Amino acid sequence: MSTTTTYTVKGMTCEHCKASVIEEVSEVAGVSGVTVDLASGRVDVTGDDVQDAAVRAAVDEAGYEVVS
Ligand SMILES: [Cu+2]
């Protein structure tokens, strides 16, 4: 079953940042959708059996920080 988890990511300031996060998180196993709201830093990750640690690592890889 597909579920959506919401994260708050610090440090995204423009469309490029947003695209980087979407690109990295989209590569995480099981992820089927990623949406980012730049203003709030809200990142919604949708998918099946997505590992929380893998999402956090992907955000870190993109150069940003998950704060919640
Ligand atoms: Cu940017």
Image (spheres, rainbow, N blue to C red):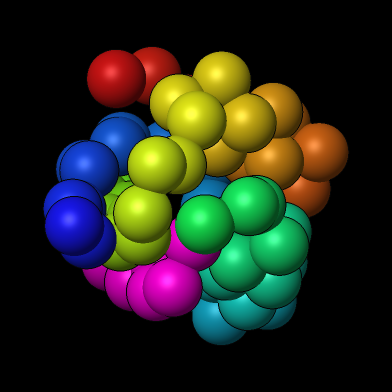
Q: Is residue 4 left or right of residue 54?
A: left
Please give the name of the residue rendered at 36% of the width and 54% of the height, measured from the top-left corner: 48
Q: Is residue 32 left or right of residue 53?
A: left
Q: Is residue 64 above or below residue 43?
A: above
Give the residues in magenta: 31-39
The C terminus lies in quadrant = top left
> Which sits in the foreground, 27 or 42?
27
Q: Does the magenta segment cover residue 27? A: no
The N terminus lies in quadrant = bottom left
Visible residue check, residue 37: yes
- How far across and down, in percent of the image, does residue 3 sit? 18, 53
Q: Residue furthest front?
A: 1
- Secondary structure mainly formed by the magenta segment: strand
- The number of numbered discs placed on residues in the rendered structure image is 0
- How far across and down, in percent of the image, does residue 28 sit? 65, 52
Please give the name of the residue rendered at 45% of the width and 42% of the height, measured from the top-left corner: 50
Visible residue check, residue 17: no
Q: Is residue 5 left or right of residue 26?
A: left
> Which sits in the foreground, 58 or 2?
2
- Tell me which corner region of the image, top left, top right, bottom left or bottom right, holds residue 47: bottom left
- Tell me which corner region of the image, top left, top right, bottom left or bottom right, holds residue 14: bottom right
Q: Is residue 48 left or right of residue 10?
A: left
Q: Is residue 37 above or below residue 58?
A: below
- How far across and down, in percent of the image, does residue 30 sit? 52, 57
Please give the name of the residue rendered at 22% of the width and 61% of the height, measured from the top-left corner: 2
- Tell me which corner region of the image, top left, top right, bottom left or bottom right, holds residue 38: bottom left
Q: Is residue 57 above or below residue 26?
A: above
Q: Does the magenta segment cover residue 36? A: yes
